[in-house]
Every structure is written in C-alpha cells, then in structure tokens.
C-alpha cells in the first residue's frame, strides 16, 4: 500500500508545490454573487473543483464551512471530496480534530477509513490534549495510507501563549510536538506521512524543523499577509518539505473558472520560485 507521504511527493513533483483551500465563508459567497445557503455552497464547491481539481496537487476543504449547513452541507462536502479525488487531487480535510481514546479513534475512522463516506487522503489535527492522545489517528492513518498534519506553530496571535510555553525539559510546547512527529516519520522515504502546520506569517520560528521528515503545511499565504518569499525566513533549510497553502488569494478570483485557474497559476509560480521540488 502506498503511503500518503509517497503520494504527496509524487503529486507535488507532477503538479507543483501548491495547496488551495476551499473556504466558502459568507463573505466569499457574497463576493461570488451566491446565496449563503446550501445552493450557494454547492455552486461554490463545484466551481472550485471544476477549476482546480485536475491542476492542483492538494485541495484543502475547510469542514466547518460545510458543517454549518447541517446534513445537507456535509453531503455537499462528501460530494466535493469524491469529485476532487476523481480529478486526481489529494484531499486534505481541515478539521483540526483532537480528543482521546475511542473518540479520537472514531474521528480517525470517519476521515481515514476508505470505507467511510468522508474518506480523505489526510486531515489536520490538534495536539493540545497531548500528542500521544492522537495515537489512534496516527495508527489508522498508517494502516490505510493516510496522513495527519498536526498543529505546531500557528499564525493566530493567541497561538504563542501555548505553543511557546516551556516544558519541564526546557523545550517549548511546539518543539515537543515537532520532535514527536519527527519520531513518527523516522526512516520514511521519500517523505513521511505525518506533517506539521506551521504558519507562513510567523517569521523566524526559533524552532528546529530539520528532522521532521514529513510535510510542512504553510497556511497564511496571500490575503492573510505572507508571500512565498517569506517561506525562506520561516523554514530555511526545511523548504523542500514545505507545502504552501493559499485560500482567499486564489478563491477571490472566482467565480470565473479561467480567473481561478490563472490565480492558482500565479500562486504556483511564486511557490516554485522558492520551494525546491524533487523530480
């Protein structure tokens, strides 16, 4: 069975280092001239899939913007996931789940078990009940060739209060997360399946990412303030593992399909100028 890390490595080599979010928040639906209801949500998601599903390495739907419409919204999310997979994109579902025991196992089954309707290639997860609490998610991901991106250094202003706090051994909380994910990827080739989320807006992190061995998801590019050039400062020698992520900068070009593609192409060109891609 092919691992998520191997699939991601190949997808980036073929399509380039770019992840695009699907974040249908009310303001963006209005900007597209769509209603803030399930019909507007469906049209938005289908347009993004048609524009980018066969062009972008990774597409990242934000689950919350589908869940807010209840069962019908989740049904549209299921359909969006299927359509993206049919077009060859890897699907990273932004859910930031985190829990313990049987509950985190149930979350893992919902998203990482190929027999489930919301099955995706990878998910985001929160480690703040302890990285070890996510063990059932890591185990199921490994069993089915899935991936998990764990929050490490986020760009929200509240993040450093927790992430930069020092533990008893002197490391920051973020560094302990980084180190534990690094251990999960030990020996993986060409890329580990367990990644980290590190915001592109945070500047010099002061943290050691050199041994992660897995992908580094970098949200915050474009409308959120970071440029592709900022990735050099944030990631330094770890740039080859970076998966840059854009949302509003690309989505704001819609609803015209050609304009969405052109915006994604511009973002990809900027990332290619910074992020080295192995063949």
Image (cartoon, helix red, strand yellow):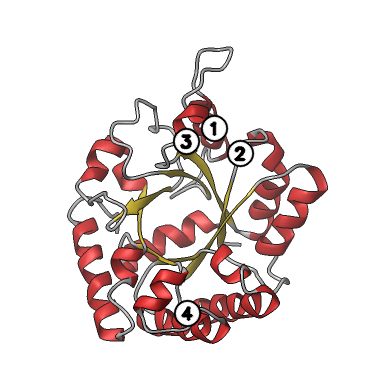
Tell me whether circle 2 and circle 1 mark residues in contact (CB < 8 Å). Answer: yes
Residue for badge 1: 177
Going from the N terminus, do you reach mark 1 or mark 4 first?
4
Residue 32 in sight from this viewpoint: yes
Tell me whether circle 2 and circle 4 mark residues in contact (CB < 8 Å). Answer: no
Secondary structure of the residue carrying numbered label 3: helix
Q: Nearer the viewer, residue 158 or 97?
A: 158
**On the picture, is 229 further left or further right than 204?**
left
Tell me whether circle 3 and circle 1 mark residues in contact (CB < 8 Å). Answer: no
Residue for badge 2: 127
Expressed as whole percent of the image width and height from the top left, the position of residue 19 reads: 38, 62
Tag nearer the camera, 3 or 1: 3
Expressed as whole percent of the image width and height from the top left, the position of residue 119 reads: 64, 68
Q: Quadrant of residue 236?
A: top left
Residue for badge 4: 45
Tag nearer the camera, 2 or 4: 4
Tell me whether circle 1 and circle 4 mark residues in contact (CB < 8 Å). Answer: no
Quadrant housing the C terminus: bottom left
Secondary structure of the residue carrying numbered label 1: helix
Tell me whether circle 3 and circle 4 mark residues in contact (CB < 8 Å). Answer: no
Going from the N terminus, do you reach mark 3 or mark 4 first?
4
Q: Nearer the viewer, residue 89 or 145?
A: 89
């Amino acid at each position: 069975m092919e691992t998520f890390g191997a699939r991601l490595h190949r997808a980036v080599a073929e399509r380039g280092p770019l992840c695009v979010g699907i974040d249908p928040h009310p303001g963006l639906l209005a900007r597209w001239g769509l209603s803030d209801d399930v019909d507007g949500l469906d049209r938005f998601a289908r347009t993004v899939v048609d524009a980018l599903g066969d062009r972008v390495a990774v597409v990242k739907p934000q689950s919350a913007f589908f869940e807010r419409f209840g069962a019908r919204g989740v049904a549209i999310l299921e359909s969006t996931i299927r359509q993206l997979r049919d077009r060859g994109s890897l699907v990273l579902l932004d859910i930031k789940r985190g829990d313990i025991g049987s509950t985190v196992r149930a979350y893992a089954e919902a998203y990482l078990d190929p027999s489930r309707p919301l099955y995706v290639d990878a998910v985001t997860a929160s480690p703040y009940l302890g990285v070890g609490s996510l063990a059932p998610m890591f185990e199921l991901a490994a069993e089915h060739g899935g991936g998990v991106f764990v929050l490490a250094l986020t760009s929200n202003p509240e993040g450093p209060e927790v992430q930069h706090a020092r533990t008893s051994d002197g490391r920051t909380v973020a560094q302990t997360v980084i180190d534990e994910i690094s251990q999960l990827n030990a020996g993986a080739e060409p890329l580990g399946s367990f990644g980290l989320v590190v915001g592109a807006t945070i500047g010099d992190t002061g943290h050691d990412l050199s041994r992660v061995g897995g992908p580094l998801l970098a949200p915050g590019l474009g409308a959120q303030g970071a440029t592709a050039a900022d990735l050099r400062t944030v990631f330094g020698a770890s740039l080859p593992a970076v998966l840059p992520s854009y949302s509003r900068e690309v989505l704001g070009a819609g609803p015209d399909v050609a304009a969405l593609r052109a915006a994604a192409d511009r973002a990809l060109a900027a990332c290619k100028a910074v992020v080295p891609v192995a063949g």
